[in-house]
Image (spheres, rainbow, N blue to C red):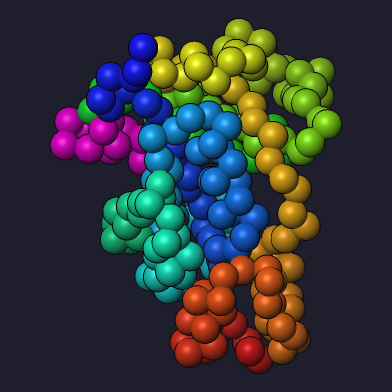
Amino acid sequence: MPDRPGKRPLGIFGGTFDPVHFGHLRLAEEAADSLELAGVRWIPAGQPALRASPQVTARQRLAMVRLAIADNPLFTIDAAEVEADRPSYTVPTLERLRQVDQCGRQQPLVLLIGADAFAGLPGWHRWRSLFDLAHLAVAQRPGFSIDSACLPAELASCYRDRFSASPATLAKSPAGRIVTFTMTQLAISATGIRGLLAKGSSPRYLLPDKVIAYIRTEHLYPEY
């Protein structure tokens, strides 16, 4: 039976994207495919709460994401966190999306995160409330699965209670489950790219050409 309109889960992908690169793009693409998502909404952080201030402005990071995702009809962008000009926290962001004029209460939402970020979840603002607002989909390396024994005790218990081996469960409720998906490992990081740019080295093939052109035009990173 085909899904009812609006029933397919919507992926939510937040981050600093300083700068956005092919690792980000591949994660979103493989999540959309593996989890049968209706699409992925990218939400660049205005002022990241858990890391140092980015080297470039929030609006410049937003512009880079717009360029990077422009050719993919599955990807959309949400600029609200950038426009809010205040620290970005995931739970308030999801609460905003749950408003009637956004996604509403019944649309399944799937927060896309990496395995390292998932392991650090107890350090997030109001982290337990995440499960009232969205499912979590954790990207993992091929051949590696999440070992609950290696997680903080409170997160390990939550993982055991909420884990589902089937992505099909995401469409059955608006929030509350944890699933994993395997993504192609690309040894690319924003930190590494910034290091290359600071030395004046080429970042070609690590991020889209449109983003590289924007970085050059705007002189976004030192020495590049």
Q: Quadrant of residue 86?
A: bottom left
Q: Horizontal and vertical percent for residue 140?
A: 72, 35
* Residue 162 in sight here: yes
Q: Classify residue 103 as left or right of residue 56.
A: left
Figure check: 56 above or below 123: below
* Residue 87 in sight here: no
Q: Classify residue 29 as left or right of residue 185.
A: left
Please state the extent of the stretch shown in magenta in the rendering: 90-103
Q: Classify residue 17 as left or right of residue 159.
A: left
Number of numbered discs overlaid on the protein picture: 0
Q: Residue at x 65, y 36 (%)?
A: 139
Q: Quadrant of residue 63?
A: bottom left
List the single residue furthest toward the left.
101
Q: Residue at x 50, y 38 (%)?
A: 32
Figure check: 126 above or below 155: below
Q: Residue at x 48, y 30 (%)?
A: 36
Figure check: 22 above or below 30: below
Figure check: 203 above or below 8: below
Q: Horizontal and vertical percent for residue 52?
A: 59, 62
Q: Horizontal and vertical percent for residue 8?
A: 37, 26
Q: Horizontal and vertical percent for residue 145?
A: 78, 26
List the single residue furthest toward the front.
1
List the single residue furthest toward the top.
161
Q: Residue at x 53, y 29 (%)?
A: 35
Residue 93 within the segment the image draws in magenta: yes
